[in-house]
Amino acid sequence: MRLYLIDGYSLLYRAFYALPQSISTREGLMTNALYGFTSVLLKILGEEGEKGVAVVWDGGLPSSRTGLYEGYKAQRKPMPEELKDQLEHLDDILRAMNVPVVRGEGHEADDVIATLSRRVPEGSELMIVTGDQDAMQLVDGNVRVMRTSSRSGFSETKVYGREEVVEEYGVTPEQIPDYKALTGDPSDNIPGVRGIGPKSASKLLQRFGSLEGIYEHLDEVSPEGTRRKLEEGRESAFMSLELARMHFDVPVDFDLEGLKFEGVSPECREVFERYEFNSFLERRLPELPVAGGGRVEAPRRRRVRIAGEPSEPSLDPVAVAPVGDGRWAVATAEDEAYVSGELPAGQLWVHDAKGCGVRRASFDTYLAAYLIQPGTRSYEPETLARERGLEGVEVEHEDPEVAGAARRAALVYALVPGLRDELEEMGLSRLYYEVELPLADVLAKMERVGMPVDVGTLEEVGREIEGRISELEARIFEEVGHPFNISSPKQLGEVLFEELSIPPVRKTKTGYSTDAKVLQQLALQGYTVAGRVIEYRELTKLRGTYVEALSRLVGEDGRIHTTLNQTTTATGRISSDSPNLQNIPVRTELGARIRDAFTASEGRVLLVCDYSQIELRILAHMTREPALVEAFRSGEDIHTRTASEVFDVRPESVTPELRRRAKMVNFGILYGISGYGLATRLGNVHPSEAERYIKRYLERYPRVSEFIRKTNEEARELGYTTTLFGRRRYVPELRSKNKSVQRLGERLAFNARVQGTAADIIKIAMVDIDGRLPEGADMIMQVHDELVFDVERDLVGEVAALAAARMVAACELDPPLEVEVKSGERWGSVAPLSLQKSDRMS
């Protein structure tokens, strides 16, 4: 028999931080940790063969460790309230799955597991399920470790036997305590020896066998710097060894038969339904036995019959889904469908019209579900149907692709009436039918047209970046004294903090932290190598993310066809991927050069129409703050005006630096930025001073302050905030017991009202403009507040005037919207284009 012992808190915390907090029930209970924990349990219980399973919980910190070192695990913060709320529900799930719990009072779960690992009967195998490295010291012939991964949606695990431990750590399982005694362990606050990292530790243990062996032969250790660190850290090393060693004498009952898994309880389905584990109900739970016999029933399904194609087309709406070979499954009723070689005429209901290639759909269940519940875990028809209490669908057909498409079409047919009612009840019908639904066709057209690319310019920029990277590499290697992989955080940490003896800033479970904040801190302290590594990372990212990636994605037509996503952001903004053309840096010289690789078609010109400070204008309109409204109406520079108000100087005395700071404050307010965040952006200001800027802003613009307060009150009461057009952004963070999460919710609620309204406005403009563009002009890209057109030269004036006028007309604001128009042959070097005011407003 195989026995699984699950380190409860390790798995729970790992699931909580690995999975998005958007995983929650419709009532707002966050369930990401419960979902991840249950996923691993189902994986284990679904394994073939006889098995025993138990979850082991901590029963407290042993005095043998806290007495030895007061700092042991003292750095750990209290459990987050969102996780604590979920923990209260985990017992329900474990009881329903018939998984017992083991706890050793006054002892850590690690020590309970260690004790039980020595009592496994001969012929049985123990699998320890954990996210921590501590258990690696227990690995032997019949004990292995299953370690969960935080990647791939928490679905991956890796099993460690002796060979895997040696391969990953460079030491044997028996040497793991010695290894931790040298490297330390930030997760448990075990200090280790300052300056000794994983690489040095494994080399020392490979040579001398143990911590004791290292110190017995200390005079043989080289280089001298390592020997000195070991000498200085002797006391810490042996104390850390005692902290790292597991205990094998915890008084805990062990009944192998009592842990044997006989099946889940009959109430398991009801419990999974309560926590809305819909995907488990469909696939994994029905595969498990029920204690006492039988299996959990899968959700009820209705049978859909595949009929012959009708001889006469129907005027009634039909639901369609692609089969994958140019044919379509067409649902004509909840229990009947047929297969056709072409799309039927008339009203079409579909799920993801743009993705399926359906134009002018009369209903798209994907877009409707997104508008009703943005940011949800899944918009798949099966999930949407289960959430609404609709039956599943079963289709029998010799071709599985036909059966799958017919099933999908039948689900869409069943979903439409309910979703249509939900949109009406929530006041979202107009936004859906007049904006989101027609926008899908607009985006599909933009993707199909694509953006022309000059590959030669991309290659030229690539060569420039490559030269600069080579130069930086040479300087870094010269300063360090040898080549190494600069892109490897592990190697970089060893070079900086062991070889160069730079004092470490922060350690992680896997070694030294070399993230951007750490490197910036080191650069400010005068370590030039850190500044060069920062630049190296920026350039390699630019090369890999843009230059190389863009070159690979240029099609045979000489264009890049990005995917424009309509349903990925909670605020309603359109996003771009494969590649992301919205994220090309525009404020750097190289970023502008990359944009210059995007050109107009032959004989055409690029036209760029950009809303001027749209979010600040929306803020002025929503708050009715007189100073903001008047500044925009009079054409005054808003950042100069803010600088005058916040820094108490006359407008003519505002310096470029004060204007820069005011600009940061203006946009920081929109994003609910903190004093620390603003100080970080400004770069040369203390957080307390930045906090004063924000306070002064809100004092000078009291209606903005009042608007923020009312927005948060309404969102806290309703659970969501709305744009001017009724789009909802749900903010469960506001109901959290954790103050920092509440503050995050306040920032999200306020920002969603403003940014979401801006997203709605440009979508309205896109739909409007698309229906008016003359032949010879194409809308080819949207970047947040900016639209890009590819226009024949003799149409530039006409299209510029049209686009600017319709963008302004998309929403009547006070102060009114304003649009800046630029043109040129290359995207990165477009220049302002003058329009008569009458043209812009017509």
Image (cartoon, grey):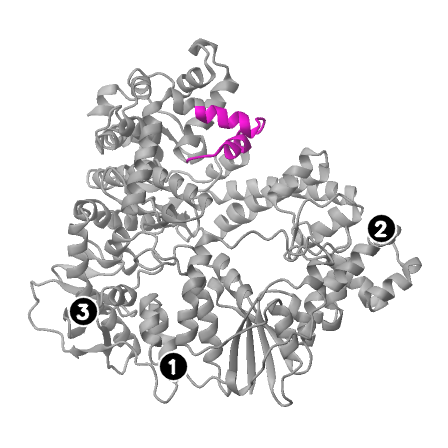
Coordinates of residue 731 in the picture (x, y in percent): 34, 47
Query: Could you tell whether 724 is left or right of 1 in the image?
Result: left
Q: Position of residue 556 (x, y in %)?
A: 41, 53
- The span shown in magenta is 672-695
Relative placement, left or right, of 621 versus 142 is left
- Please indicate, yes or no, whether residue 335 appears anywhere in the rendered image: yes
Q: Which residue is mark 3?
A: 330
Amino acid at the residue labelled 2: Glu
Residue 344 seen from this side: no
Earlier in the chain: of badge 2 and badge 3, it is 2
- Percent across and percent down for residue 378 are 34, 61
Q: Mark 2 or 1 closer to N-term?
A: 2
State the residue at coordinates (56%, 46%): 541
Amino acid type assigned to the residue bearing label 1 in the image: Glu
Q: For the residue marked with disc 3, what is the amino acid?
A: Val
Mark 2 to mark 1: distance in Å? Answer: 58 Å
Check disc 2 and report its element: helix, strand or loop.
helix
The relative height of residue 223 versus residue 213 in the rendered view (above or below) is above
- State the residue position of label 2: 232
* Mark 2 residue crowding within 10 angstroms, few (<14) / some (14–19) / many (20+): few
User: Which mark is in front, 2 or 3?
Assistant: 2
Q: What residue is pinned by disc 1? A: 287
* Mark 1 neighbour class, 10 Å CA radius: few under 14, some 14 to 19, many 20 or more: some
Task: Give the SS element for disc 1.
Answer: helix
Label 3: state its secondary structure. Answer: strand
How crowded pointer 3 is (Cα within 10 Å; few <14, some 14-19, many 20+) is rated as many
Q: Whole-percent x and y of residue 58?
A: 57, 66
